[in-house]
Structure formats: C-alpha cells, structure tokens
Image (cartoon, rainbow, N blue to C red):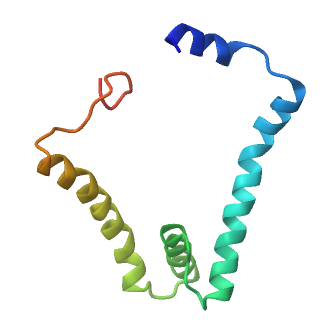
Amino acid sequence: MTRSSTRRRWLDPVSPGADLAIRTLPFVLSVIAGATDIIGVLGLNGLFTAHITGNIVVLAAHVVAGEPAIFSYILSVPVFMLVLLLSVCLPAASSGLRFLRCGRCCCCS
C-alpha cells in the first residue's frame, strides 16, 4: 500500500455505522480500563492493576487532603520511567544499534 493510497483511504468519507464506531471506541475503551482498575483496587485490597495511574491518583489524594505522601507512591513514577528508559537503551546498546529513527515524526527529524 502506497502512501497516497493510505492518505486517500483516511480522507474518504466513512459510512454512518463506521463513524459511530470510531466516535464511541475511545469512550468504550476508557470505561473498560476504568472498570478494570476499580475491580482490581476493590478485589485485590488496594493493589492497582494500572499501577502508575493508581499510584498517581493516591499520591494526589494524599497531597490534596494534606496528609503525608507515601514514599513508595512518590518513588513509583521515576522508577517506572527509569525502567522504560533502560528497556529501550539496553537492547539498543547490546545490539550495537543507535535508537531507531523513522525520520518523519517530530522526535526523529
């Protein structure tokens, strides 16, 4: 599929049924993600299945309520970001490659 055919496909009008599905998909996925998080918190005694979102929410609730912040919640976000960075850098370094660049997005150009 060429770039022009892909662009043409995205610019063509879609059927009303497909348009409705495209518009409701983000809402449906958000409801599913929220329900999964709530079920996890209630069913697993406060353990968040989406741990970064949950830890940030609990940290914000403690700060807003004026309670002392729990150190593990403060530490969870930078540790998560560090592990993400290492998961990209270590495989690239071990294979001798630099970061893969597409050359089209704002980060790579």
Quarter of the C terminus within the rendering: top left
Can you name the residue that lies furthest to the top here?
A: 4
| Image-based side of 108 in relation to 62, left or right | left
Can you name the residue that lies furthest to the front here?
A: 1
Question: In terms of depth relative to the viewer, which is nearer, 70 or 7?
Answer: 7
Instruction: Answer above or below: position of 100 versus 105.
Output: below
| Image-based side of 74 in relation to 37, left or right | left
Going 59% across and 10% down the picture, which residue do you hit?
A: 5
Going 80% across and 43% down the picture, which residue do you hit?
A: 24
Can you name the residue that lies furthest to the bottom here?
A: 45
Question: In terms of depth relative to the viewer, which is nearer, 37 or 66?
Answer: 37
Instruction: Answer above or below: position of 64 versus 87.
Output: below
Residue 55: x and y in percent read 50, 75
Residue 6: x and y in percent read 58, 16
Find residue 37 and report its image quarter.
bottom right
Find residue 33 and report its image quarter.
bottom right
Going 55% across and 84% down the picture, which residue do you hit?
A: 47
Question: In terms of depth relative to the viewer, which is nearer, 5 or 72?
Answer: 5
Residue 9: x and y in percent read 66, 15
| Image-based side of 66 in relation to 80, left or right | right
Instruction: Answer above or below: position of 62 versus 10.
Output: below
